[in-house]
Amino acid sequence: MPAIVLVGAQWGDEGKGKATDLLGSAVDYVVKFNGGNNAGHTVVIGNETYALHLLPSGILTPGVVPVIGNGVVVDLGVLFEEINALESRGIDTSSLVVSANAHLLPPYNRTLDKVVERFLGSRRLGTTGRGVGPTYADKMARVGLRVQDLFDEKILRQKVEGALVQKNQLFVKVYNRRAVSVDEIVDELLVYADRLRPMVADTSLLLTKALDEGQNVMLEGGQATLLDVDHGTYPFVTSSNPTAGGACTGSGIPPTRIDRVITVMKAYTTRVGEGPFPTELTDEDGVRLRKEGGEFGVTTGRPRRCGWLDAVVGRYAARINGTTDFVLTKLDVLSGWERIPVCVAYDVDGVRHDEMPMTQTDFHHATPIYEYFEGWEGDISGARSLADLPGAARRYVEAVEQMCGAPVSAVGVGPGRDSVIALRDLIG
């Protein structure tokens, strides 16, 4: 049975949690393959709203095995806070599996993330301050801590000592902070060892066996395509690969086991933090999108920057990820506009670009070229088929499909779990 990848098309916050939840009853495993608690998914079930950060969205679906893959960085304090919060609301988390190869996010990296952002001043990147970037940097510098290290105190201590040789030089001599002791870090991490131990497994082997047995595995990306450290709007990106390629390295599943890539795209565009954003609206339309879309970060609470849909970004996401299906979310937020602009190309110093500019400089100077679509009126949250939508809304969905280069297989028309128009089977 092939695996399914689900990723975001824009700068995150597209509604991937809703899409994951939509697919949840048809899959057996949901795997978080990148990122940490620097992003969040919101899932609405009935009158209940769940904000997830480290846990895969599949944890809310009975019968699904949620997996934290090797590509994730894990803040153990946050993980267990999240588990405790769900269990207090009657959610069973006992089936959670955590990769032995996932990296731990130590307390000193949270501190480092915050002081570096302050130090950068106007050149800051707009990180969440959760320590995710420094932890990925440690991973690449080979001074990181892995989940499996918790179960060998000698190894854990040696690795913490090695990491703090450089970190303490930075804290004391550059950032005027106190040195961090090895003992305090080791003691804080070991508190979680016994509770974590039963959850830990060789998740690559687990998932391969599941696929061999004909079970459905969904690989769920945090963040989104334009935040990918290789393919995003660098340097204003995350520190991992939230694209379809990252699903393989972050889960241990080879690309030959994947045949479906579902890319989630909001019916307009948002981003949090610094960086270029060609269709950003700084006028009353931007304020209206933020208010009506509830555009505030799940993790940070920061107001999101809002703008019109960017089809250049959509085409780029389809190409980078090998998108087989788009899920278009939050179409209901666009109800009530007289006309709706969509960016179909960029003007860069008088030259038209129908695809993403090659250089950061050109993207920074890109001015959107808009095509305008007729708006529609009324509440569409009760629509369950395209025929239920106003004609202008149907034409908008059809235009997005044509402009972005892959079928729109589902449309979100409201925040509720069932507020979805399913156009094609996303599993078969």
Image: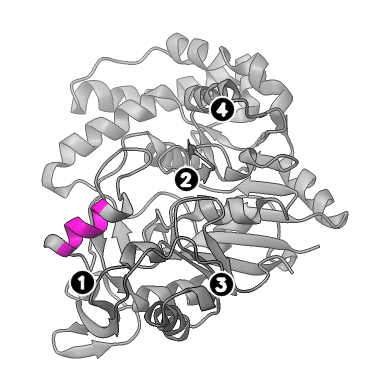
Residue lying at 37% horizontally and 81% vertically, measured from the top left: 392
Disc 4 vs disc 2: Cβ atoms closer than 8 Å? no
Q: Which one is earlier in the sequence, the residue at label 3 or at label 1?
A: 1
Determine which residue is flagged by label 3.
Answer: 385
In the image, taking residue 271 as reference, residue 152 lies left or right, namely: right
Q: Is residue 29 above or below residue 367?
A: above
Give the label, 4 or 3, closer to the camera.
3
| Amino acid tagged 2 | His
Disc 1 vs disc 4: Cβ atoms closer than 8 Å? no
Disc 2 vs disc 3: Cβ atoms closer than 8 Å? no
Disc 4 vs disc 3: Cβ atoms closer than 8 Å? no
| Amino acid tagged 3 | Ser
User: Which quadrant is the N terminus positioned in?
Assistant: bottom right
Q: Quadrant of residue 275?
A: bottom left
Q: Which mark is residue 86?
A: 4
Q: Quadrant of residue 276?
A: bottom left
Disc 4 versus disc 3: distance between alpha carbons? Answer: 33 Å
Q: Residue furthest right?
A: 213
Determine which residue is flagged by label 1.
Answer: 361
Indicate the secondary structure of the residue bearing disc 1: helix
Look at the image and name its color scheme: one colour
| Amino acid tagged 1 | Thr
Residue 46 placement (x, y as % from top left): 54, 42
Determine which residue is flagged by label 2.
Answer: 41
Give the label, 2 or 1, closer to the camera.
2
Indicate the secondary structure of the residue bearing disc 3: loop
Residue 206 placement (x, y as % from top left): 78, 44
